[in-house]
Amino acid sequence: MTALALTPINGEPRIHDLLLAERLGFERLVKVRDIIKRNEAKLLKFGVLPTVGKTSGDQGGRPTTEFYLNQKQAIFICMKSETEKALDVQVEIVHVFDAYLNSESTPEPSTNVLATQLSELLNGKVLVDFESLELFINGLLAAQRTLRNVGGIAQQIEQQCGRTLFDHRFLSP
């Protein structure tokens, strides 16, 4: 099961709807979107509800909308899901957001998320608007910063070991 990760949307930490559905134990992850759509007016009382339009296949296909929920929206969806894992996921959401708020740093998307987004973008599966493209580019820049940090750590380890352990072509800017 994938760890609960935050995705930065306009500098604000968000949880992707399908990741939340996975954590809640939904058999069909997309079913969480039915709950979101039924409760959209209520969710908007907790803030804006960013979405990304995508298509299902390599050659286009059925369009869908992905949702990115803030902390309150995600907890609300947990309550509405009525799954056995809902309480545990709510606690996890609180801990993840607390860790983010206490670190006062921008959440950086995982490389898996970025790889998937890039693949979907290149294969035309994503309907891109300028805001989404800007968010994607910001995610790539954050990943680049992370790789630079990893490169510095790798060099320190290599100096202590006295031998080359990493291919630095992938860790340099």
Image (tube, helix red, strand yellow):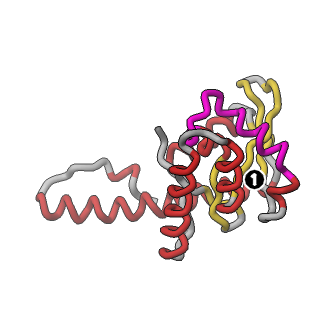
Give the labeled residue for mark 1: 132
Residue plotted at (52% across, 69% down): 98
Q: Is residue 43 left or right of residue 109?
A: right
Residue plotted at (81% across, 62% down): 48
**Near-viewer residue (12 or 117):** 12
Tell me residue 103's x, y (percent): 48, 74
Mark 1 Cα within 10 Å, few/some/many (few <14, many 20+)? some
Tell me residue 109's x, y (percent): 55, 54
Amino acid, disc 1: Ser
Residue plotted at (71% across, 39% down): 32
Tell me residue 123's x, y (percent): 69, 31
**Near-viewer residue (95 or 82):** 82
Q: In which quarter of the image is residue 65?
A: top right
Tell me residue 99's x, y (percent): 48, 68
Main secondary structure type of the part rendered in magenta: helix
**Near-viewer residue (47 or 104):** 47
**How many marks overall?**
1
Q: Is mark 1 on a helix, strand or loop?
A: helix
Residue 32 forms part of the magenta stretch: yes
Residue plotted at (77% across, 37% down): 54
Residue 157 forms part of the magenta stretch: no
Single out the residue that lies furthest toward the right. 41
**Near-viewer residue (34 or 111):** 34
Q: Is residue 132 left or right of residue 108?
A: right
Q: Give the range drawn in magenta.
A: 22-40
Q: In this view, does 37 lie to the left or right of 167?
A: right
